[in-house]
């Protein structure tokens, strides 16, 4: 008979009873915050926990644990959550601050162009004539006659129609989505017409509540995407979702619950009812798009990387369980191809590169970076699998852009200065800080172009098993441990930036231009807003062009979703824009290996 097992996670105080899963899996099942960037593969080492009490037995430390943990740490009870199981008895596990997911810092939209307000959702206030013996038209026909057109409606609305009309004394407001009646409301409710624009990112979810009468954005809410518990990158989530229908449903429920929470927050902030939200437009990469819809992303993850659906599609909100009018519609902005989703399409809406004569480059830097190059004639697109190091993962002291993260670094001689998100003591370093650090180390002559330390006698280099450069000494850090970077960390970062450079280099070659001929560069996404331009150019993350033509586009994804929400014309432009886009699969390009190897070392373009 299997021994009873119970695991209590502190400081949450939650107890889970299960002997067949790892500590990471148990934390995920209980919605406890524990980092798992590599999806439980034992690669990132971020799920470090401490066993503070055990009455029973644990699994033995694995080789992967010994790669990430020192022997004295293991002796003190530290383990990797993704590798450890409680085999029997009771166990109390402490999750240190550095192993928790935090609330990510989100920037606002940099480019938020106004568009003519012509939403798909419209309202018409009607005063109907009452039935008489001389006028016995059925209620639906009476409504359509007053409306001046035939319109479909659901059986639910039809069933409620007699009571709605009579209780409202024949004065009602008809809500239409395209030519479909989605609500009949008592009185004049024309001013209460709202929509939601959502960006479902791999790391974060952003929601904007919009008045479809004035076009004003009434509330902006955001939070971490809880799916990160099942892997930081989209490949890990494809793997998890593909294991069983239950796993796919779990990931869908997580993101839907998150969106509903954000909608509730937005409604409370603006004082409106969710019943007056009639459409939601959303964007996301291809995997996030599929997971939200509950569609398996399995075949996006294997060659030739084919999604289930890519066109603009709409579904009733009630089919997805979204907190809005149950007869309202959820509209998916179209995907491009492969991993490149509707967030990249939204990027094009905001930056308008498809309407310009000059050639523009847009880069949305992240775990799966999306790169677009083109003008009004044609647009090339590619996906650069740059890994999670831009998000602070796979770096010894790496962390997300949350309070306590070092976000910028400056080195002058032997003096190192840094800034920390939230003006707190540092806990680690996030992606923008890593970019600064690597560039500054190179310019200061501390590392070679391949990321190797030149002089191990440097006052900030310690040798603790492997050489480490100290960014913040333990007496100045929140963790009371040195915040460091190793040659392995730097190499991980150079591989990621090499993927980015390979992407825009191959797109430029295919387009027939030199990167120096690019007119404008747009850095999209929250991460791009925090990048130091000079350091990004030093590392060849972006081409070296006139600085005034390098623009921070900000959160283009939710901005594009919002423009599509507000304007039918923008949706039509989308269809025209998609016809101009040519997808380039980097991995099958003849020059890929050559370009990638050449792009890894630090060499300014």
Image: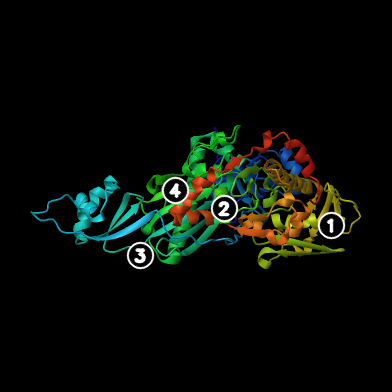
User: Which residue was labeled with disc 2?
Assistant: 355
Q: On the picture, is 428 further left or further right than 603?
A: left
Q: 476 and 456: which one is in front?
A: 456
Asked if the residues shown at circle 2 and circle 1 are in contact, with their CB atoms under 8 angstroms apart, the answer is no
Alpha carbon of mark 2 to alpha carbon of mark 4: how far? 24 Å
Alpha carbon of mark 2 to alpha carbon of mark 3: how far? 34 Å
> How packed is label 2: few (under 14 Cα within 10 Å), some, or many (20 or more)?
some
User: Which residue was labeled with disc 1?
Assistant: 443
First in sequence: mark 2 vs mark 3: 3
Q: Going 59% across and 37% down the picture, which residue do you hit?
A: 239
Residue 251 in percent (x, y) is at: 52, 44
Can residue 401 be seen here? The reply is: no
Could you say whether the residue bearing mark 4 is in a helix, strand or loop?
strand
Closer to viewer: mark 2 or mark 1: 2
Q: Going 35% across and 65% down the picture, which residue do you hit?
A: 191
User: Which residue was labeled with disc 3?
Assistant: 191
Asked if the residues shown at circle 2 and circle 4 are in contact, with their CB atoms under 8 angstroms apart, the answer is no
């Amino acid at each position: 008979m299997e021994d009873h097992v119970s695991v209590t996670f502190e400081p949450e105080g939650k107890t889970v009873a299960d002997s067949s899963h790892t500590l990471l899996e148990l934390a995920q099942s209980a919605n406890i915050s524990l980092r798992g960037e590599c999806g439980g593969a034992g690669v990132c080492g971020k799920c470090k926990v401490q066993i503070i009490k055990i009455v029973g037995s644990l699994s033995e430390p694995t080789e992967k644990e010994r790669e990430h943990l020192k022997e004295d740490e293991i002796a003190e009870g530290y383990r990797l959550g993704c590798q450890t199981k409680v085999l029997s008895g009771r166990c109390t596990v402490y999750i240190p601050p550095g192993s928790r997911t935090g609330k990510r810092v989100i920037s606002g939209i940099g480019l938020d162009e106004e568009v003519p307000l012509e939403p798909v959702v419209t309202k018409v206030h009607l005063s109907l004539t009452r039935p008489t013996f001389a006028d016995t038209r059925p209620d639906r026909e009476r409504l359509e006659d007053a409306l001046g057109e035939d319109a479909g409606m659901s059986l639910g609305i039809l069933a409620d129609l007699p009571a709605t009309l009579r209780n409202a004394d024949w004065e009602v407001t008809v809500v239409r989505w395209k030519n479909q009646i989605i609500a009949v409301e008592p009185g004049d409710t024309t001013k209460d017409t709202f929509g939601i624009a959502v960006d479902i990112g791999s790391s974060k979810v952003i929601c904007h509540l919009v008045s479809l009468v004035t076009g004003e954005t009434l509330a902006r809410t955001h939070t971490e995407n809880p799916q990160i518990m099942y892997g930081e990158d989209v490949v890990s989530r494809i793997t998890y979702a593909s294991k069983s229908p239950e796993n796919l449903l779990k990931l869908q429920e997580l993101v839907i619950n998150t969106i509903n929470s954000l909608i509730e927050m937005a409604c409370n902030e603006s004082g409106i009812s969710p019943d007056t939200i009639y459409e939601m437009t959303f964007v996301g990469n291809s995997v996030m798009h599929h997971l939200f819809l509950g569609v398996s992303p399995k075949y996006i993850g294997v060659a030739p990387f084919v999604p289930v659906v890519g066109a603009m599609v709409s579904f009733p909100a009630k089919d997805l369980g979204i907190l809005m009018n149950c007869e309202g519609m959820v509209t998916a902005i179209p995907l491009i191809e492969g991993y490149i989703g509707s967030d990249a399409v939204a990027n094009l809406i905001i930056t308008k590169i498809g309407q310009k004569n000059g050639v523009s480059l847009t880069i949305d830097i992240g775990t799966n970076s999306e790169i677009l190059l083109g003008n009004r004639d044609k647009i090339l697109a590619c996906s650069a699998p740059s890994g999670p190091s831009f998000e602070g993962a796979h770096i010894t002291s790496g962390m997300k852009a949350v309070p306590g993260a070092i976000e910028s670094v400056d080195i002058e001689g032997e003096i190192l200065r840094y800034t920390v998100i939230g003006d707190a003591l540092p806990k680690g370093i996030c992606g923008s800080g890593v970019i600064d650090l690597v560039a500054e180390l190179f310019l200061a002559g501390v590392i070679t172009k391949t990321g190797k330390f030149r002089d191990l006698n440097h006052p900030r280099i310690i040798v603790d098993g492997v050489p480490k450069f100290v960014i913040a000494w333990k007496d100045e850090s929140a963790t009371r441990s040195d915040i460091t970077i190793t040659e392995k960390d730097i190499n991980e970062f150079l591989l990621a930036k090499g993927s980015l450079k390979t992407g825009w280099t191959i797109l430029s070659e295919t387009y027939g231009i030199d990167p120096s001929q690019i007119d404008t560069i747009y850095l999209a996404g929250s991460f791009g807003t925090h990048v130091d331009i000079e350091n990004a150019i030093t590392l060849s993350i972006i081409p070296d062009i006139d600085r005034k033509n390098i623009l921070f586009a900000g959160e283009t994804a939710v901005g594009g979703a919002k423009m599509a929400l507000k304007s039918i014309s923008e949706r039509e432009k989308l269809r025209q824009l998609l016809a101009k886009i040519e997808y380039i699969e980097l991995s099958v390009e003849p020059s890929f290996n050559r370009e990638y190897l050449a792009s890894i070392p630090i060499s300014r373009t």
